Image: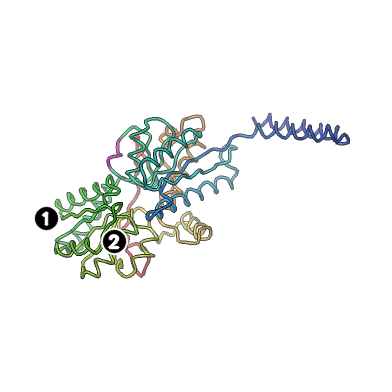
Amino acid sequence: MIAARSALQYNIAMWVRRTRHKPTRFSFGVALLAALASSCAPKPLTLGFIGGLSGRNADLGISGRNGALIAVEEANEKGGVRGRRVVLEPIDDAQDEAKAVAAYASLSAAGAYAVIGPMTSDMALAIVAAYDKGPPLVSPTASSPILSGLDDIFLRVNPPNASEAEWLARYAHADGVRKPLVIYDESNKAFSEGIAAAFSARYAELSGRQAMRISFDSERGARHAALAAEARETGADGLVIVASASEAANLAQQLRKAGFDGLLYGTGWAMTQALLDNGGASIEGMAFTHYFDPNGVGERWLRFRSRYERQFGRPADFVAGLGWLAASAAIEAYRSAPRLPAKEAILKRASFDGLQGELIMDRYGDAELERFKIVVRDGAFVSAP
């Protein structure tokens, strides 16, 4: 293709020299040959993106999309991938299963090489239930264990949430929590119920005591003050909130107003800038376990963080980093094995350089990453010893 393009460009140049003094023939010929030349250019490598870009939980989708966009821009700044420009085509699923399925159908029909997303487990389960063939989903953040160990279109760059719940249980036990309570949002049931169950099981193993649970559905309008009062009445001294950033921030504020002075723990679902923006003093000391270290000093992370803040006017969070990683994995897989279907190329390569260490995928596309303990301190996420 490159040789053909060079020959065509040479022939165009020679023709222009012979006909430049014949205006009508020259104008028509240049237009025709320009069209022929452009038809030889390789088609862009299209990556789709599916995530919630509107509504109260849009922080997750927006950060993931922005991170993926930086990965695409970086590839194009280096000349594209194997001569092809990379483009990102984002679609808002509005955290609605029907819209997520329709978005996947549209991107598949448009010839997307891979689809970055979706951002939540419920949306991923809906797409996987509807399609067993097509471009692979490479999710930055969907972590339900229901999606683990399956030979399907779903791949991910973050570990399943069972390990997150187990580490939170270890922290709570080590912190001296004797009466833990898990409050979880059923609007992302595949994720939240899994976290609640895994936390309870691990805490029981460590302490011999059972964790209490309260569920709510933010889609039906959560009554945070009532939830906080119910939680206060349980006598819990440690509380795990499994909800989005906005829901967790509101609930934490109401808990403190209700007089709860115990320890707070959260999940990656809430660990975004929106939690810091809206939680205020109520979330000070809230603990998380994550494979993202906000205080990381590696060159790759610092370069990404600087670019993200400069480009989008806000700090880079772990979701942005995972969006970048998901898009980078798809791009690098194509670079390594352009003739293979995307899923095969990604799984064949299996190992990818992340912003804070190496990503390793198993044969089912489930990921492994090192974890850190993160706490909110002075209005920021910081790593804890």
For label 1, the SS is loop
Nearer the observer, 327 or 49: 49
Give me the residue at 68% from left, 29% from top.
4
Q: Amino acid at mark 2?
A: Ala
Q: Which mark is residue 31?
A: none
Q: Residue furthest left?
A: 208
Q: Residues within 10 Å of mark 1 (few under 14, many from 20)?
A: some
Mark 2 or 1, nearer chain start: 1
Q: Is residue 316 above or below residue 82?
A: below
Q: Amino acid at mark 1?
A: Arg
Secondary structure mostly seen in magenta is: helix
Q: Residue furthest front?
A: 220
> Which stretch is magenta?
145-149
Nearer the observer, 55 or 363: 55
Looking at the image, residue 265 sits to the left or right of residue 37; the answer is: left
Nearer the observer, 176 or 61: 61
Q: Position of residue 62 (x, y in %)?
A: 44, 53
Q: Which residue is mark 2?
A: 287
User: How many numbered discs?
Assistant: 2
Give me the residue at 57% from left, 45% from top.
76
Q: Quadrant of the C terminus?
A: bottom left
Q: Position of residue 112 (x, y in %)?
A: 49, 36
Q: Which residue is mark 1?
A: 209
Task: State yes or no: residue 148 in magenta.
Answer: yes
Task: State yes or no: residue 346 in magenta.
Answer: no
Q: CA distance from mark 2 to mark 1?
A: 21 Å
